[in-house]
Amino acid sequence: MEITARLTGDAKISTLKNDRQVVNFNVAINDSYKPKGSSEITKLVTYVQCAYWVNSNIAQYLTKGTLVELHGRIGVNAYNNMQGEAKAALTFHVNSIKLHGKPKYESNSTEAASPTPITADEKSEPTDDLPF
């Protein structure tokens, strides 16, 4: 199965008893549709918990807001909470991750800083020596 989604938070690495590491993260899948006989678009967001066992070094790139393409299989975790109510959560067991760019926002990026204004004296005309 393949899904494309945005991370809802930074990935976390968990170490198990046998020193095996798993990268856990959550994603939001955005979808929209127009119900029959309606002119309004209905938006739907599905949240999925993900587990990646292959390489824990990827966790540094899995930050909140990053768009990722995930390949793997989906599973359901069903349990009863402390009040005895039945609960369930989707878990995506990820086999491969493809990063599709940085988050929409970055607080410490130099690119996000305000650009320095250019005065009229500093402007230059483009040259016409383009190779095409």
Image (spheres, helix red, strand yellow):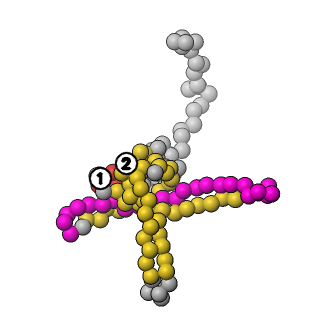
Decide: is 96 above or below 75. above
Q: Give the image location of residue 77, x and y in percent.
A: 42, 70
| Residue located 56% across and 14% down the image | 127
Whether pointer 2 and pointer 1 mark residues with C-beta atoms closer than 8 Å, the reply is: yes
Decide: is 80 above or below 99. below
Please indicate whether residue 50 sits to the left or right of residue 126 in the image: left
Q: In front here: 105 or 92?
A: 92
Q: Residue furthest left?
A: 18
Q: Of callouts 2 and 1, which one flags the residue occurring earlier in the amino acid sequence? A: 1
Q: Amino acid at mark 2?
A: Ser
Q: In front here: 76 or 32?
A: 76
Look at mark 1 in the image and give the residue it sits on: 54
| Residue located 62% across and 60% down the image | 44
Q: Which mark is residue 64?
A: none
Number of residues whose C-alpha sits closer than 10 Å to that of mark 1, classed few (under 14), some (14–19) or many (20 or more): some
Which image quarter is the C terminus in?
top right
Q: Give the image location of residue 122, x and y in percent.
A: 56, 26
Q: Give the image location of residue 43, x and y in percent.
A: 66, 58
Quadrant in the picture for residue 23: bottom left
| Residue located 26% across and 60% down the image | 21
Note whether residue 17 is visible.
yes
Report the span colored magenta.
17-41
Asked if the magenta segment contains residue 89, the reply would be no
Look at mark 2 in the image and give the residue it sits on: 96
| Residue located 50% across and 50% down the image | 4
